[in-house]
Amino acid sequence: GGESGASSSAAVAVGEMVDDAQQVFRNPFGSEPSSQDFNKDLYCGGETELFAGLLRFDVDYNPVPYAAESYELSDDGTVYTFKLVEGMTWSNGDPVTASDFEWSYKRQLDPATAAAYAAFLFDIKNGESVNTGGGATVDDIGVKALDDLTLEITLEGPRGYFPTVMAYVAALPAHRASVEEFGDKWTEAENIVTNGPWIMTAWDHDSQMIFERYEDFKLEPKAKLRKRISPIVDSAAQLAAYEANEIDRAQVPVAEIKRLQGDPQLSKELQTFSLT
């Protein structure tokens, strides 16, 4: 939402939900993403719901099972064993396996990837050593697929907060075959393969992205909308686009809140909330 200065609150305008036949939501991005590769740059500005991590945050920001249906912690607090949901697929039909997560985390920690925020995974055994040239090799990183549905992660020591890390965007996977075939172009719409509730069907750079519901997504919650169109609209220009019925949600500048509150229709669509 649009920040309202020192008051630490925000306001957005949200239009009425489209009818069931359409199920299309025009939800703007404030700027052009640099990619959709959270594995390499977790602040790339892309759409996080293209991917499903082992855990996710619930409405109270507690880490809960997602691609992993459960996990166990060793008695000494240093080894997490995640059991993946059976039957998950990438958007091209490939099965989602524990090896996908092993490869993705090792890719992020490999200095050759030059992931700017690899430190989020430094709790994993030998992760920091590998990333910073401390002598360990990628094969020494404490992530191992025991079988297709079992992932074992060994930490440098007990880390009670580690499930929170696993629910964060730093722990989203990437599709190995696509990365290896297309390199930095793997997240272009014609190349990208994802495992989340949405697939990206178009990316007209500096203009808009189009996301459609992945009908074979096995996890909950599933996407309820059929399609999302995300035009690239600078935050300062979103309200004008909203009032022109070009988008269905907009950040509201602080200076415009009183005007909207006094408008018989727009006041019903204005939503404010605290950021603290």
Image: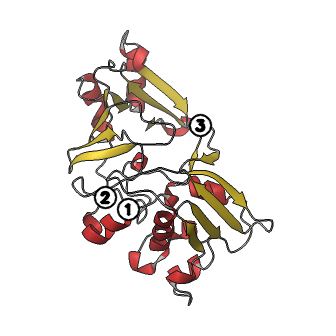
Residue positioned 41% across, 30% down in the render: 224
Q: Element at badge 2? A: loop
Please tell me how crowded label 3 is: few (under 14), some (14-19), or many (20+) other residues with Cα within 10 Å: few
Q: Viewer-nearest of labels 1 and 3?
A: 1
- Disc 2 from disc 3: Cα separation: 28 Å
Residue positioned 57% across, 72% down in the render: 144
Q: Viewer-nearest of labels 2 and 3?
A: 3
Q: Is residue 270 above or below residue 212?
A: above
Name the residue beneath numbered marker 3.
59
Name the residue beneath numbered marker 1.
175
Q: Earlier in the sequence, mark 1 or mark 2?
A: 2
Name the residue beneath numbered marker 2.
34
- In the rendered image, which quarter is residue 183 located in? bottom left
Measured from the top left, where is residue 252 in percent x and y?
39, 31
Give the residue furthest to the bottom. 135
- Split into 4 quadrants, where in the image is the C terminus? top right
Q: Viewer-nearest of labels 1 and 2?
A: 1
Q: Earlier in the sequence, mark 1 or mark 3?
A: 3
